[in-house]
Amino acid sequence: MSKELIRLQNVCMAFDDELVLDHLNLYFNDKEFLTLLGPSGCGKTTTLRIIGGFATPTSGDVLFDGVRINDVPPYQRQINTVFQKYALFPRLDVFENVAFGLRMQKRPDPNNPKKMVKIPEKEIEQRVMEMLEVVSLKGFERRKPEALSGGQQQRVAIARALVNRPKVLLLDEPLAALDLKLRKDMQIELKRIQQQVGITFIYVTHDQEEALTMSDTVVVMDQGTIQQIGTPEDIYNEPKNAFVADFIGESNIIDGIMVKDKVVKMYGKEFPCLDGGFAENEPVDVVIRPEDIDIVPVEQGQLIGTVTSVTFKGMQYDIIVDFRGFKWLIQTTDHCPEGSRIGIKIDPDGFHIMKKSQYSGMFGDYSSFSEEYDELDDASLTLDEEESGDAE
Amino acid sequence: MRKNNSLFNRFFMVLTFVFLYAPIALLIIFSFNAGSSNTVWKGFSLEWYGKLFSNRIIMQSVYTTLLVSVLATVIATVAGTFAAIGFFAMRRKIRDPLMTVNNIPMMNADIVTGVSLCLFFVAFFGLFQKVTGTRLTLGFGTLLIAHIGFNIPYVILSVGPKLRQMDKNLIDAAMDLGCIWMQAFWKVILPEIKPGIVSGALTAFTMSIDDFVISYFTAGSSASTLAMTIYGMTKKRVSPQINAISTLLFVTVLVLLAIVNIREARQERLAAKKHI
């Protein structure tokens, strides 16, 4: 891709004795859409605040275009932010909110370069109107923020940041407060805006689907460390450890042994797969995505299990199948009644083999399926936790 | 049975109001009395108000009271507002105990505050004289310091909630868009917390106008507030001038309190409307 713009070097952040960021090393390319993805408290918002200049790292360096900017205050950075819940100025109308940054700016007078002057009113008006057009909000100039819907407020916040022509736009869970339908529309809208203005977007979210839809690069974080960096496809298809596999999409994660290259053993049976490069008989985590499993008659099955629950999801059924005490999630268009015995078949490319990590054994069993879903759906809960966690 | 009960309640309510307000009503009525008697009505007159305004001692103390109240209010409002912002920026673990410390002076008996301030000033003056050889005495300066001191907690108490209602990210947003902290304060924080500041200032002003006990112990002999002057006059003979000046004081405080309460009620209504 294009050239590197921001680099975090060995960045650590501690609140009291709690280490929120642990030796973070990360770089951001110019013009890319990068997403920091992770559960609440993983340090993603803190990372964003460090880049924006609202927090100073306990140790380590922040480089912008190769220059150290640890101590550069937010108003001197070529970076603007779209805040959680927008943070529009309630007493100013849409036009004045967007114009705020321009009114604060001073630049050298074209006739007398030593003198700093304000941006002329005419140019401010032109740039504000231009930006309102980009976010499809023409005609709303004189509305107060409270008279706008959530999605419109969101657009004002984006326009207010972009009108300053920053090199980087930071977005802190900008869609979390919107309903599902609007969120989907705004995802596409945001991607369009990013391509139109052609700058770097750094996006923070705990929603894996959002991250996969919009990003060029996804950075998966947990407990203040980076778990994996890659394209959405890489992250989904080749998760590095059980945490990433579980956090991105749905995964069955089973204990296995890599007998030799392209042969993995689980449940005492050998399966052909495509992975290699492990030691002989190395214990591994085997990831099988729910959509990669075919249901076959019992006599043809590589494994045989009992269906313990069936949930209708519209496009498919989510069924939980018990294989000797370990519960799998399988997505199928066939209806298998609860209690029936079924066989399954997995193609070699349906296996993804991962090295054992600190996360092994923590994820990938669907015994408590419903609870897990509840947790993921409750976005407001995780938002609040994130806020208080970072503030204290 | 129920009706009786409610009649009983009403009777006591009326009785309470009579006890509370009858003396004040009496005072107001007799401030307009033509004679110098406080018991016999001799016809309507503004005589005592006229005498009041030509009484140099009283006018001097009115001036002192207004000056100390205005100065103390302005200084306490500025100091209290910034103190509230400081509290707001603190972590909860530190903020909550400090807020309790802030609230104690408001509940503390005035007499204790007054005496302790008096002792403190005298002790400080003693030390000051030892070091510099200059003798300082209680007076307008100490009175002002005392008033600023007891006003600050009220300002903090009324600004604090406004800060907590404000979206924390607003300050970050302003700084993100090119403001240094002070600009963010003027452009963003101040408009948001202005209602709290005004309420705080009005409360502080009322407290200052109203105060007797703390002033009595900190003003020394050179300065005298209105309340102190009235107290001094009652020691000799209760002149109807006292009725007149007390009436004016009562009306002033009443108006101020009414403004504070109406403002608060209106804000609550507005806030409630916003949430719907």
Image: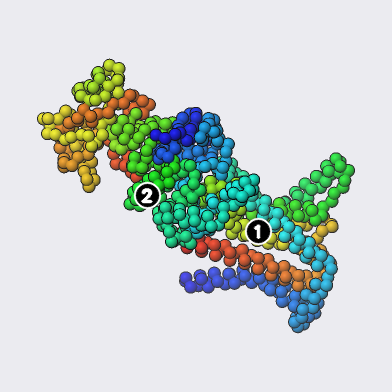
A234 w.r.t. B46: above or below = above
Q: Residue at position x 48%, y 62% from top?
A: A142
Mark yes or no: residue A40 visible.
Answer: no
For disc 1, the marked residue is B201
Position in image of residue A33 (x %, y %): 40, 40
Mark yes or no: residue B10 visible.
Answer: yes
Between the residue at mark 2 and the residue at mark 1, the CA separation in whole angstroms equals 48 Å
Figure quadrant of residue B256: bottom right
Position in image of residue B26 (x %, y %): 71, 74
Q: Is residue A237 left or right of residue A54?
A: left
Q: Nearer the viewer, residue A131 or B191?
A: A131
Q: Secondary structure at mark 2?
A: helix
The numbered disc on residue B53 is: none
**Between marks 2 and 1 in the image, the one whose residue lies nearer the viewer:** 2
Q: Residues within 10 Å of mark 2 (few under 14, many from 20)?
A: some
Q: Amino acid under label 1? A: Ala
Farthest bottom residue in view: B43
Q: Nearer the viewer, residue B37 or A308?
A: A308
Q: Secondary structure at mark 1?
A: helix
Figure quadrant of residue A240: top left
B86 w.r.t. A244: above or below = below
Position in image of residue A196 (x %, y %): 40, 47
Q: Residue at position x 64%, y 45% from top?
A: A114
Q: Amino acid under label 2? A: Glu
Q: Residue at position x 37%, y 49% from top?
A: A189
Figure quadrant of residue B212: bottom right
Q: Nearer the viewer, residue A224 or B68?
A: A224
For disc 2, the marked residue is A189
* Chain under callout 1: B
